[in-house]
Image (cartoon, rainbow, N blue to C red):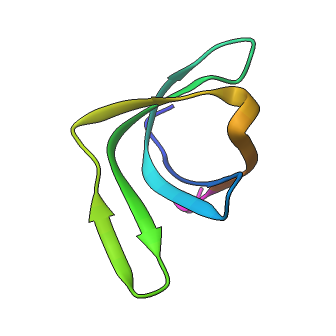
Amino acid sequence: MNKKLLLQLNGDRKLVGILRGYDAFLNVVLDNPIQVFDDGEVQIGPQTVVRGNSIISIEPLDSL
């Protein structure tokens, strides 16, 4: 919790944000999510929920 994550989603999408919560279905709540593109990045909003069935991989970006 409260760690910066990189989520790789289906459809070659990537989101970077701060983990605020999750549930048994791996639905994830991210604060300050940024969608990362090859040519730049786009701010999505203050908070978003990502459905677990669209997540391909999760990578922590903060060092332990």
Which of the image's four quarters has the C terminus? bottom right
- The picture places residue 41, in percent across and down from the top left corner, at 34, 72
Q: Residue at x 61, y 27 (%)?
A: 51
Query: In the current view of this chain or complex, which residue is farthest to the top?
Result: 24
Q: How many marks?
A: 0
Q: Nearer the viewer, residue 18 or 44?
A: 44
Task: Give 25 or 13, whichever is nearer the viewer.
Answer: 13
Name the chief secondary structure element in magenta: loop
Q: Is residue 26 left or right of residue 40?
A: right
Tell me what residue is drawn at x 55 percent, y 62 percent: 61
Q: Is residue 29 left or right of residue 56?
A: left
Residue 37 x/y as whole percent: 46, 75
Residue 15 sits inside the magenta stretch: no
Q: Residue furthest bottom?
A: 39
Q: Residue at x 74, y 16 (%)?
A: 25
At which x and y percent is residue 1?
51, 31
Residue positioned 56% across, 61% down in the render: 14
17, above or below 61, in the image: above
Q: Which residues are magenta?
A: 60-64
Tell me if residue 62 is in the magenta stretch.
yes
State the image coordinates of residue 31 (x, y, percent, origin top left).
33, 37
Name, please, the residue furthest toward the front.
11
Q: Is residue 8 above or below residue 12?
A: above
27 vs 33, left or right, is right
Position of residue 44 relative to residue 21, above or below, is below
Judge from the rendering whether residue 51 lies leftward or rightward of residue 57; answer left or right: left
